[in-house]
Image: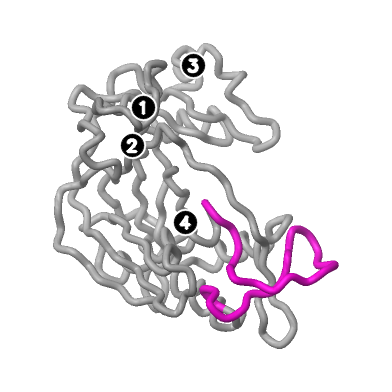
């Protein structure tokens, strides 16, 4: 497993630093969901109200992804929460690539130490191996593998033995999350011969309008899980021209995504998490 260091609790700082001004006047609150009924239930409103807030709601539906994207969920400005966070540094010193060795993430300060480590590990894994980039590097190419698999991970990768990779996953994620990832079509990873890891190799871009993210306070649910929202702040203004200028940026939109941790005999496991950008 990687190494971890934890800061003292502190107020959240937006990830773009001094370039971003805290949105004291509130922002537009948005959410993506599989159905309008789901949105209405979560935000204690009606489907009719969601449609009124989103005159173009039918255009926001992606038949490919099967979701309604970025629906406005309340008329009044949303006040961005300032709950304390802890900065967790995750370090895997055996990884060959300097950039991929370390990830620094803020997580809710009210989580216990084990939950903080699990959530920070999930951010690390998803940013480096299942998000911005997908798949382990370095790898040796192999012809004729199914799906998008390109080859098997070699020394210097995050893991080279599937048994060790599986142990990491089961220390961080719920069984359901792991099953979903490994059984995706196409799958990003698979077990190869002699305990090797078959891997894809891919990259994606990020949202240039991303300003940072904060969290609502984790709440214990009747099923024993901890659930809260990741509040992703962006600048959707037509005047936004990127980060090269000298002017500071005020986020005007918050898109919330669900974070869920489930209890096990060995501690909390991440069951739902999306990268914020």
The mark that comes first in sequence, 3 or 2, is 3
Is residue 140 or residue 134 the one in the foreground? 140
Whole-Å distance between the Cαs marked 3 and 2? Answer: 24 Å
The spot of residue 95 in percent (x, y) is 47, 75
SS for dot 1: loop
Q: Secondary structure at mark 2?
A: strand
Helix, strand or loop under label 4: helix
Locate the N terminus by quadrant. Answer: bottom left
Q: How many numbered dots are placed on residues in this image?
A: 4
Q: Where is residue 207 drawn, in percent x and y?
A: 46, 37
Instruction: Tell me the crowding category of disc 3: few under 14, some 14 to 19, or many 20 or more residues within 10 angstroms, Cα based.
Output: some
The disc, 3 or 1, on the residue closer to the chain's N-terminal end is: 3
Kindly identify the residue that appears in the image at 62 percent across and 78 percent down.
Answer: 154
Q: Which residue is mark 4?
A: 127
Magenta-span inclusion, residue 126? no
Foreground residue, 227 or 270?
A: 270
Q: Earlier in the sequence, mark 2 or mark 1?
A: 2
Residue hosting label 3? 54
Residue identified by numbered label 1: 235
| Secondary structure category for the residue under label 3 | loop
């Amino acid at each position: 497993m990687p190494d971890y260091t934890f800061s003292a609790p502190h107020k959240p700082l937006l990830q773009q630093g001094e370039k971003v001004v805290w949105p004291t006047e509130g922002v537009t609150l948005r959410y993506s969901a599989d159905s309008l009924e789901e949105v209405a239930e979560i935000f204690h409103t009606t489907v009719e109200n969601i449609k009124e807030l989103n005159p173009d709601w039918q255009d926001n539906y992606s038949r490919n992804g099967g979701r309604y994207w970025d629906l406005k969920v309340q008329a009044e400005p949303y006040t961005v929460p300032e709950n304390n966070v802890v900065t967790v540094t995750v370090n895997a010193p055996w990884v060959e690539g300097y950039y991929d060795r370390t990830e620094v993430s803020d997580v809710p300060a009210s989580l216990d130490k084990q939950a903080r480590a699990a959530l920070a590990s999930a951010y690390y894994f998803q940013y480096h191996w299942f998000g911005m980039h997908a798949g382990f590097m370095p790898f040796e190419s192999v012809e004729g593998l199914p799906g998008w698999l390109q080859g098997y991970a070699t020394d210097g990768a995050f893991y080279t033995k599937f048994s060790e990779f599986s142990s990491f996953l089961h220390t961080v994620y719920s069984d359901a999350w792991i099953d979903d990832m490994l059984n995706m079509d196409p799958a990003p990873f698979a077990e190869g011969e002699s305990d090797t890891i078959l891997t894809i190799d891919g990259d994606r871009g990020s949202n240039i309008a991303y300003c940072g993210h904060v969290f609502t306070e984790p709440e214990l649910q009747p099923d024993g899980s901890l659930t809260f929202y990741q509040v992703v702040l962006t600048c959707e203004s037509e005047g936004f021209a990127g980060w090269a200028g000298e002017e500071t940026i005020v986020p005007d939109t918050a898109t919330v995504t669900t974070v869920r941790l489930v209890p096990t005999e060995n501690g909390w496991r991440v069951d739902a998490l999306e990268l914020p950008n």
